[in-house]
Image: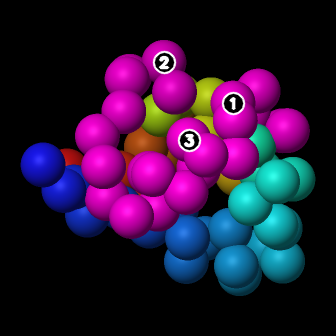
Amino acid sequence: MNNKNNVKKLREERLISKMELARLAGVSAATIVRIEQGETCRLETKRKIILALGFTLADKRKVFPD
């Protein structure tokens, strides 16, 4: 199932590569690719990405609006 998210848009606005976001979030680059394509991920992975993009957990809807 595909879920709409803003990870790619936000990552590109911050001029961060997929590899750099993966490193900051502590996940694999393949995970970032899958999430940007709209695939589902675990809540813990979402949390890591939200924080790596510089948001607080209260801002989670800016990254994952679902």
Secondary structure at numbered mark 2: helix
Secondary structure at numbered mark 1: loop
Picture coordinates of residue 36, whole percent (x, y): 46, 62
In this rendering, the answer to whether 3 lies above or below 22 is below
Q: Which residue is mark 2?
A: 44
Q: Separation of disc 1 and disc 2 at Cα?
A: 10 Å
Predominant SS along the magenta part: helix
Q: Separation of disc 3 and disc 2 at Cα?
A: 12 Å
Query: Which residue occupies the extreme left position in the image?
Result: 1
Q: In the image, 11: left or right of 24?
A: left
Going by the numbered disc 2, the residue's amino acid type is Glu
Going by the numbered disc 1, the residue's amino acid type is Val
Does 43 appear in magenta? yes
Q: Which residue is mark 3?
A: 31
Nearer the observer: mark 1 or 2; the answer is 1
Secondary structure at numbered mark 3: helix
Q: In the image, 3: left or right of 21?
A: left
Q: Quadrant of residue 43?
A: top left
The residue at the point 70 percent across, 46 percent down is: 29
